[in-house]
């Protein structure tokens, strides 16, 4: 499930909850950016209370990548509003009563995923990524790729 348009900040976690409610037997994995996750992380408390089991992978690059790319394409530079602080999303998950794991090295990702898939309840994997590793968003360049 993916809405597009203006990147749909904050929809990932609520949609994962809805997917799990619709198909309780199905494994559910949400992949979201740190900016989008920041809009909705409080829903982890509801997911825990509702005993929903799913995995959230937060791609933590400490920037609003969509915004940064749009500004760079439109204006040739970007404002400092695109930068985020170093937020520990795994700690946020634990504060909501969920399991939270921080993955700082790629070689630890498979192990963290295996742990997450065995857990009963919501699990957040806070995966540290390169701030400049994002795909180009062609809509800002006047190109649409279907």
Image (tube, grey):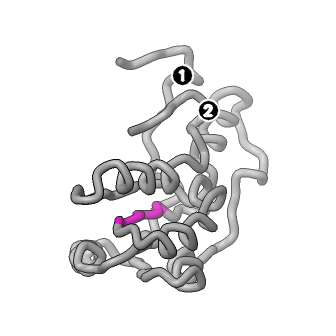
User: Circle 2 sits on which residue?
Assistant: 6
| 58 and 94: which is toward the camera | 94
Q: Where residue 80 sits: x, y (%)?
A: 77, 53
Task: Pick the quarter of the image with the N terminus.
Answer: top left
> Could you give the CA–CA distance between mark 2 and mark 1, rounded to whole angstroms?
10 Å
* Range shown magenta: 54-59
Which residue is located at x 23 percent, y 56 percent?
26
**SS assignment at label 2:** loop
**In the rendered view, does 1 fall on the left or right side of 137?**
left
Q: Is residue 70 above or below residue 134?
A: above
Mark before the other along the chain sequence, 2 or 1:
2
Q: Is residue 112 above or below residue 146?
A: below
Q: Where residue 52 sits: x, y (%)?
A: 39, 67
Mark 1 surroundings within 10 Å by alpha-carbon count, few (fewer than 14), some (14 through 19), many (20 or more): few
Which residue is located at x 64 percent, y 43 percent?
68
Which residue is located at x 49 percent, y 33 percent?
3
SS majority, magenta: strand
Q: Are marks 2 and 1 in contact (CB under 8 Å)?
A: no
User: Circle 1 sits on which residue?
Assistant: 139
| 4 and 52: which is toward the camera | 52
| 27 and 6: which is toward the camera | 27
**SS assignment at label 1:** helix
* Foreground label between 2 and 1: 2
| 100 and 35: which is toward the camera | 100
**24 within the magenta span:** no
């Amino acid at each position: 499930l993916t809405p597009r348009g203006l990147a749909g900040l904050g929809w990932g976690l609520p949609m994962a909850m809805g997917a799990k409610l619709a198909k309780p037997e199905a494994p559910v994995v949400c992949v979201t950016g740190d900016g989008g996750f920041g809009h909705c992380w409080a829903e982890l408390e509801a997911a825990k209370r509702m005993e929903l089991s799913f995995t959230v992978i937060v791609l933590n690059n400490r920037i609003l990548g969509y915004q940064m790319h749009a500004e760079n394409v439109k204006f040739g530079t970007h404002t400092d509003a695109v930068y985020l602080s170093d937020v520990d999303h795994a700690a946020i998950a634990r504060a909501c009563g969920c399991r939270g794991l921080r993955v700082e090295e790629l070689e630890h990702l498979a192990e963290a995923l295996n742990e997450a898939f065995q857990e009963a309840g919501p699990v957040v994997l806070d995966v540290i990524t390169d701030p400049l590793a994002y795909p180009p968003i062609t809509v800002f360049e006047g190109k649409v790729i279907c």
